[in-house]
Amino acid sequence: MTQSPTPHMMNGYQLLSLIGRGNTATVFLAQKPGGAQPVALKVPFTETLAHQESAERFANEVRLSLQFRHPRLVGGLAGTPFGSSAYLAMPHYPGGPLDELMDRQRLTVPQAIQVLSDVAAGMEELHRHEAVHQDIKPQNVYLDAQGRASLGDFGSTYFVSLGGKVAGSPFYMAPECYRGELVGPPSDIYSFSVMAYELLTGERPHVGDSYDSLMISHLTHFPPPLHVEAVPRTLQRLLEQGQAKRHEARPTAAQLARAFRSALGEPEPEAETAPAPACSAPPSRLGRHAPAAPVAAVPVPAAAPAARAAEPRASWNPFKRRKS
């Protein structure tokens, strides 16, 4: 993939270091001149912008990141959805993506419950706005300096009222998605429950070396029941139900989030009204009707300070087996 030399300035940000490089974009640790906190600056490749579907997915991520305001969702700080200067500025999460931590070590059960509780809260917020993430997996969960998690990467996210295109990652995708069916929030519940099983047991419930073998596993295989002593049985049952083949049999995000809060001994949050989207334009499917000018989200949450300069990541391999 052709890449130009890294400039010192981009979109008004000073580039400090390379955080990672994926299949569609490069992420830099950057800072506004005179700014107090560093940010993660995501810049799509030229090839990404030249491909209509990839460009629309990036634009979708920019617009939705700027709309969602919740501590357990990776919100955008500023961005341009389309054009040669397209970018997305986000808070920097010095703990990195969850999958990198899982490659280095197995999380303790208390750590796993806290991370899953955070992600469940973010998922609950998305579903409260009738939005479906469609790609919940460890790679899209980001950790701050204290190990708290936030759900990010909204390129495949859609609003139920507008519809979308079926998407997902083979190890975590719901059976109905393999069949090409768009059923809404229950598909997120399935992906979340698969990730929870992996975090709590150290084993993926579905493995395979190809898309077809994983599809057969998700459609026909039932993983062993969860038996984790430190996890309340009520929560384990909900996570088992979350992997039901029939989407109607799965719990809701609100039920899961409530069960995780109970497991952690946390009080229920006070009822709140839905905040107005930070972006003035109406929600769109895959970034359509997006403004061409840069958009800034308000209010801007403070980003966590960088604890270390992360090593660049290799492109993600969807069939990579987790180290035992």
Image (cartoon, rainbow, N blue to C red):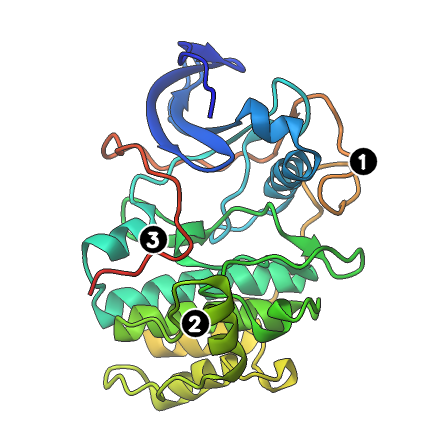
Lower sequence index among marks 2 and 3: 3
| Residue 265 on image: x %, y % | 34, 75
Q: Secondary structure at mark 1?
A: loop
Q: Which three-letter amino acid code belongs to the residue tagged 1?
A: His
In the foreground, 122 or 101: 101
Is 76 left or right of 39, judged from the image as shown?
A: right
Which residue in the structure is indicated by mark 3?
A: 98
Which residue in the structure is indicated by mark 2?
A: 194
| Quadrant including the C terminus | bottom left
In the foreground, 223 or 215: 215
- Residue occupying image coordinates x 35% and y 37%: 304
Taking the image as drawn, is residue 268 in sight?
no
Which residue in the structure is indicated by mark 1?
A: 289
Q: Secondary structure at mark 3?
A: helix
Check contact, mark 3 vs mark 1: CB within 8 A: no
Q: CA distance from mark 3 to mark 1?
A: 33 Å
Select label 2 or label 3 by which is in front.
2
Mark 1 is surrounded, within 10 Å at the Cα level, by few (under 14), some (14 to 19) or many (20 or more) other residues, namely few
Is 11 left or right of 162, judged from the image as shown?
A: left
Q: CA distance from mark 2 to mark 3?
A: 14 Å
- Residue occupying image coordinates x 70% and y 62%: 130
Mark 3 is surrounded, within 10 Å at the Cα level, by few (under 14), some (14 to 19) or many (20 or more) other residues, namely some
Q: Vertical placement of 94 versus 218: above or below?
A: above
Number of numbered callouts drawn: 3
